[in-house]
Image (cartoon, grey):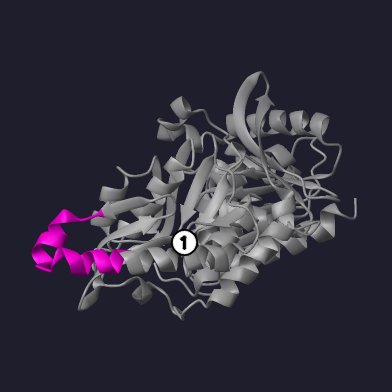
């Protein structure tokens, strides 16, 4: 996985951390490069942001080789194996440590200024860096936040070698890493732009975060965990309502996915920024998901979606739209065909509308079908389904995209198309 820059990495990482939103986390960035990544994570999660200052201890005459790290509060993480193999005098190693202690104190003052350190007592803390090489610095950061009272420590990075991730799973309660390439030599190889982050940028980002989110921003649209009543069955969900939201979009996930789908969450974030509420919830219980046949049994999934829609109407008196992916799109169209559905708009991403069968002709909600140009089988199915629809509809083909829209920019185009479709049809109701 290649990242465009640290902002891109942070946005992608934030989606993989959405499951922590309900834990009221604190986000800590490792300076310098980790802070731009952490800033995006904190923005999307609506969490406070601070800096966690640790310093790598480099072997004299070979400073790229770290023999350990130190952090605030007197925490030390030392690799005895590297110390022995370096054959450097202890006095020289001590001199490195003393110099880094002075730099650690300087950085803490420089980055935080007069602001107090974030209180971590009893909190879930997400430690973020732009990548991991040896893992010594990340391990020190985890120890620092534990010493400061964190109840749970989550280490989150865009990229790291597999062996470092395996080791760090013993240092943190949870490790979230988007990419673990085996052919790993340096973090910078996995970014198109890995230019140095200056101190001034770190200070600016921390000051922006301390000032709080602007009204209507993604952070202001922070989602909250909810229990969705689907005809007496309780399903786990996440509801986000931006300030001034004029409608809510319900997400019906596809086969092999859930409310934690990073693709659906990326689209949901974009909708939130456009002041559209979102509800992501699991159509199936964990036990039901174990049987693959359940994800293709569209009629009961559609019934469950309709029940959840009735529950949502009791909670939020706003127009409702459906966003369905894969088999979830079939469930959305099936449910939208009910005579009393009153669904304002439907968007299908890489959907299987063919599985809605004869129900397609009963859909009255304006329907947008989005398919990747290289997803040829599904594209043919969508073309055939479009001929069965009697409502306002459109088929959008994303150039170069495959079924999961993993290509650079493909998912952004999906989000923009969905946002415009919902804004046009839901806000006019």
The verdict on residue 75 being magenta is no
Within 10 Å of disc 1 (Cα), the crowding (few <14, some 14-19, many 20+) is many
Question: Picture quarter containing residue 291?
Answer: top left
Q: Can the viewer see residue 30?
A: yes
Name the residue at the top extreme: 232
**Magenta range:** 78-97
Q: Nearer the viewer, residue 346 or 268?
A: 268
The x, y position of residue 49, in whole percent, is: 60, 55
**In the image: residue 153, left or right of residue 348:** left
The x, y position of residue 290, in whole percent, is: 40, 31
Q: Residue at x 46, y 61 (%)?
A: 30
The x, y position of residue 126, in whole percent, is: 50, 49
Total labels: the figure holds 1
**In the image: residue 106, left or right of residue 341:** left
The x, y position of residue 354, in whole percent, is: 57, 48
Residue 308, placed above or below residue 420: above
Q: Main secondary structure of the magenta part?
A: helix
Residue for badge 1: 30
Q: Residue at x 64, y 29 (%)?
A: 304
The verdict on residue 83 being magenta is yes
Question: Picture quarter containing residue 332?
Answer: top right
């Amino acid at each position: 996985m290649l990242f465009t820059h640290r902002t891109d990495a942070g946005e992608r990482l934030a989606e993989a951390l959405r499951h922590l939103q309900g834990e009221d986390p604190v986000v800590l960035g490792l300076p310098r490069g980790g802070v731009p990544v952490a800033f995006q994570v904190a923005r999307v999660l609506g969490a406070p942001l601070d800096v966690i200052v640790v310093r790598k201890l480099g072997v004299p005459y070979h400073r790229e080789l770290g023999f350990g790290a130190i952090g605030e509060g007197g925490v030390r993480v030392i690799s005895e194996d590297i110390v022995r193999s370096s054959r450097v005098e202890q006095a020289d190693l001590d001199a490195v440590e003393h110099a880094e202690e002075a730099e650690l104190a300087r950085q803490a003052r420089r980055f935080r200024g007069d602001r107090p350190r974030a209180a971590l007592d009893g909190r879930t803390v997400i430690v973020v860096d732009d990548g991991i090489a040896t893992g010594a610095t990340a391990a020190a950061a985890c120890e620092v936040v534990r010493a400061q009272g964190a109840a749970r420590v989550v280490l989150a990075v865009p990229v790291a070698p597999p062996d470092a991730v395996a080791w760090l799973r013993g240092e943190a309660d949870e490790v979230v890493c988007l990419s673990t390439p085996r052919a790993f030599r340096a973090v910078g190889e996995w970014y198109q732009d890995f230019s140095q982050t200056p101190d001034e940028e770190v200070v600016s980002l921390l000051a922006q975060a301390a000032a709080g989110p602007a009204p209507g921003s993604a952070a202001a649209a922070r989602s909250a965990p909810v229990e969705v009543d689907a005809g007496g069955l309780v399903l786990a969900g996440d509801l986000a309502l931006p300030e001034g939201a004029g409608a809510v979009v319900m997400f019906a996930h596809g086969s092999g996915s859930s409310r934690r789908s990073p693709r659906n969450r990326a689209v949901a974030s974009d909708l939130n920024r456009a002041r559209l509420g979102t509800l992501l919830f699991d159509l199936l219980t964990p036990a039901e998901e174990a049987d693959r046949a359940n994800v293709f049994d569209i009629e009961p999934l559609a019934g469950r979606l309709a029940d959840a829609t009735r529950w949502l109407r009791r909670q939020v008196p706003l127009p409702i739209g459906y966003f369905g992916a894969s088999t979830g799109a079939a469930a959305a169209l099936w449910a939208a065909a009910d005579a009393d559905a009153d669904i304002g708009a439907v968007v299908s991403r890489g959907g299987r509308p063919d599985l809605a069968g004869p129900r397609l002709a009963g859909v009255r909600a304006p329907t947008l079908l989005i398919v990747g140009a290289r997803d040829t089988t599904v594209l043919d199915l969508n073309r055939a389904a479009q001929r069965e629809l009697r409502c306002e509809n459109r088929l959008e083909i994303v150039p170069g995209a495959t079924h999961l829209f993993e290509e650079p920019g493909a998912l952004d185009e999906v989000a923009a198309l969905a946002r415009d479709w919902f804004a046009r049809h839901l806000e006019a109701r």
